[in-house]
Amino acid sequence: MHRFLSLFFFSFFFSCVFSQTISPQVIASTGSHFTGANHQLSWTLGEPVISTLVMGNSVLTQGFHQPFNQVFTSVTSVEDVFAVQVFPNPCENILNVLFSKPAVVELNLCDALGKQIFTQPINEMKKAEINLGFLSNGIYLLEIKNTSGQMLQLLKVFKN
């Protein structure tokens, strides 16, 4: 009986000492975390895919760094929510942007590195045309911002 208790004690002790711990990790090409008196800033670079998987109490976030397992979202005004269609995508020369209701927004086209190529204001229109004929083939980002500069949508545009 004494051997059994000794074996049990050593097994328990070594399992506690050599047990595995899992801590949150970010795998990216670069990133950092800064903490101030009333704020925190965490950033990563080089993660093009965004996905969040939830199973019970476990949360797996992919594609962006989340220091906390809670995500807070809110809608400030239901009137500001509208749908946007971009076609044809991929396009050769003319890209059509169709809004579900007349919009006062700003369209910003950026390259894959985030450099702004051009800006087009939209005033109370439901449709806009963007000439992409002068651009080389590639992937571009179309930012749709309201008049206060808040990002409403970010769309990926392919130029052939």
Image (spheres, rainbow, N blue to C red):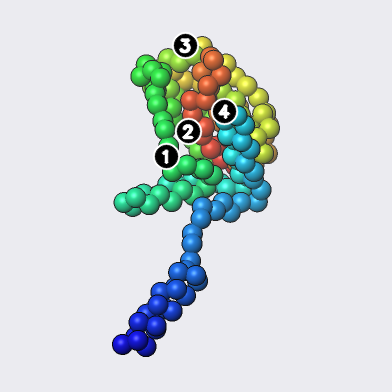
Q: Residue 38 bears which disc, if any? A: 4
Q: What's the amino acid at mark 3?
A: Glu
Q: Residue 87 bears which disc, if any? A: 2
**Residue 40 in the image: x percent, y percent?**
58, 34
Residue drawn at x 61%, y 36% as measured from the top left: 35
Instruction: Say which label, 1 or 2, has the lower sequence index.
Output: 1
SS assignment at label 2: strand
User: Disc 2, disc 3: CB below 8 Å?
Assistant: no
User: Disc 2, disc 4: CB below 8 Å?
Assistant: no
CA distance for labels 2 and 3: 20 Å
Q: Quadrant of the N terminus?
A: bottom left
Instruction: Say which label, 2 or 4, has the lower sequence index.
Output: 4
Q: Is residue 65 above or below residue 103?
A: below
User: Disc 1, disc 2: CB below 8 Å?
Assistant: no
Mark 3 highlights which residue? 124
Residue drawn at x 60%, y 29% as measured from the top left: 37
**Residue 86 in the image: x percent, y percent?**
47, 31
